[in-house]
Image (cartoon, grey):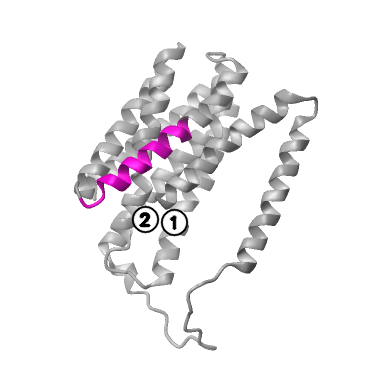
Amino acid sequence: LLHGAFAMGAVLSPLALIACTGAREGGWRMMTGGIVVLCLCQLLLYFKMRLPAENITKSIKKVDRSFLKNRNFWLGAMILFFYISAEYAIVNWLVTYFKDTGILSDRVSQLMSSLLWVVIFIGRMIGAVLVGRVARKYILLADGAGMLCFFLLVFFSRSELPIFIGIMGIGLFMATIYTSAMALGIEGIRGNDLGVSTMTLIGSTGGIITPAVVGLVAERAGLQTGMGVVVAVTVILLAAIILS
């Protein structure tokens, strides 16, 4: 449910950008101003919100690194790394890819980002219903296989309808990978803030590295080849899920 709320913000922001830029010349300034207002509201929220009490000590005598020997920690971190690699690369390059190839118009290409996040939001609501009713391993396997199949459909398609279907399929199967992998990874290390933070950090590095690699490959061999990097990452993601 928490990740569903995140997806809702990702749905609305591209639509707001289209509305601002379509309404007037220099509409991007309106969007930028809106983001600044939201940032200020966020700071105010952080200042006012109540947080649970913590036992803070002035010196740390011993750091619990036992999570480094936990198999689930490494499996969860591995899935998170390749999932965030694929997600960030898709989100960052999807619109540019459609514009560059000329398959979709600029405006329709921009809407693909919102379509993706609408379906991710729906998928996360479905995932919230499935929790406790379907084993996590089956959800992860279905997610990994489905995400790969639908991304391949988008990658090889040259017309609008299969791309729309592919984008919706990618969003649906992407929706619950992060939360399922996180739940897998923190089994046995609950309460260890360093362990959870380290797992999140490992995953986040994928979101830094892979979009940059896609860009570097695209500069040298074209964006179609660059998106081939994402295909390889989704294959490795499915392999990591099967291994776990």
- Left or right: 40 with respect to 65? right
Seen as rendered, the residue at the extreme top is: 159
Please, is residue 125 above or below residue 199 in the view?
Answer: above
Residues at marks 1 and 2 touching, judged by CB atoms closer than 8 Å: yes
- Left or right: 214 with respect to 232? right
Residue under the point 24% across and 40% down = 141
In percent of width and height, residue 95 lies at: 56, 26
Which residue in the protein does label 2 denote? Answer: 77
Circle 1 packing at 10 Å, graded few (<14), some (14-19), many (20+), is many
| The stretch drawn in magenta includes residue 149 | no
Which residue in the protein does label 1 denote? Answer: 202
Amino acid of disc 2: Ala
Please, is residue 144 above or below residue 192 in the view?
Answer: above
Amino acid of disc 1: Ile
In percent of width and height, residue 93 lies at: 54, 31
Name which of mark 1 and mark 2 comes first in the sequence.
2
Circle 2 packing at 10 Å, graded few (<14), some (14-19), many (20+), is many
